Image (tube, grey):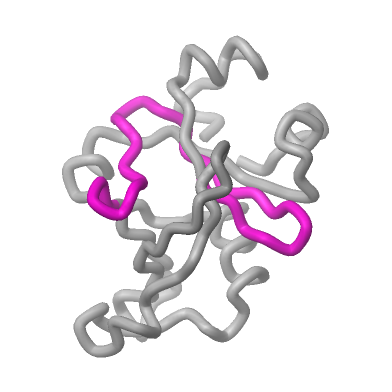
Amino acid sequence: MRFKDIHNRFFCSHTGAYSILTAREFADSQVTLTDDEFQLANLFFGGRIHSGSVRLAPDGALKEFLLYPTGKQIGLNLIYPKPEREELRLYLSERRGFKPRPGDIWFLFEREAELFLGAMPSNEWNRHFGTISSTQA
C-alpha cells in the first residue's frame, strides 16, 4: 500500500509503500514487489534492475538500500527473475541485515533521494498508524 500523509510525516519521507510479510515470503526469503512497492523501486532504480538469475550478474542484481532506522547501508538482490514477466523480486537476507519476521510490516520509502528499507512488528506499526488488514496490504 502507498504511504499516506501520516506515514510520510513519521518517516520524513517523500513517498513510500508497505506490506505485511507473509509466512511464505519469510520461508522463501523473498518478496515480490507489487503495485506501489513495484512503482517506487522502478522509479528509484530506473533501468538498472537486472533481468534473469542473480547468478548471471551478481553485481547487477545487488542494490543498495539504507536500513531504517539506523541509515546503515545494506545490499540486497533485486531482480526481474523471469525476463518475459513483470515480476520484481527482492531477496531477504539475515546475513546481509534484512529479514523481517512473518507478520511484520516491511516498507520502502524515499527520503532526500535515498531509498530506505525497513520493517516493524505489526503491533508497533498499529500503535503508530492504526490497524491494517491483510486485504489492505
Decide whether residue 118 is among the magenta residues: no
Q: Position of residue 72 (x, y in %)?
A: 51, 50
How many numbered discs, if any? 0
Q: Position of residue 48 (x, y in %)?
A: 53, 84
Q: Position of residue 69 (x, y in %)?
A: 57, 37
The quarter of the image holding the N terminus is: top right
Q: Residue at x 81, y 32 (%)?
A: 9
Residue closest to the eye, 107 or 135: 107
Q: Is residue 96 visible?
A: yes
Q: Is residue 30 visible?
A: no
Q: Is residue 88 above or below residue 33?
A: below
Residue closest to the eye, 113 or 29: 113
Q: Is residue 31 above or below residue 60?
A: above
Q: Residue at x 49, y 57 (%)?
A: 73
Q: Is residue 16 above or below residue 123?
A: below
Q: Residue at x 45, y 73 (%)?
A: 86
Q: Is residue 30 left or right of residue 85?
A: left
Which quarter of the figure has residue 101?
top left
Which quarter of the figure has residue 126?
top right
Instruction: Give the extent of the magenta segment.
Output: 93-117
Q: Residue at x 36, y 46 (%)?
A: 98
Q: Is residue 92 left or right of residue 34?
A: left
Q: Position of residue 41 (x, y in %)?
A: 57, 64
Residue closest to the eye, 58 or 104: 58
Which quarter of the figure has residue 75?
bottom left
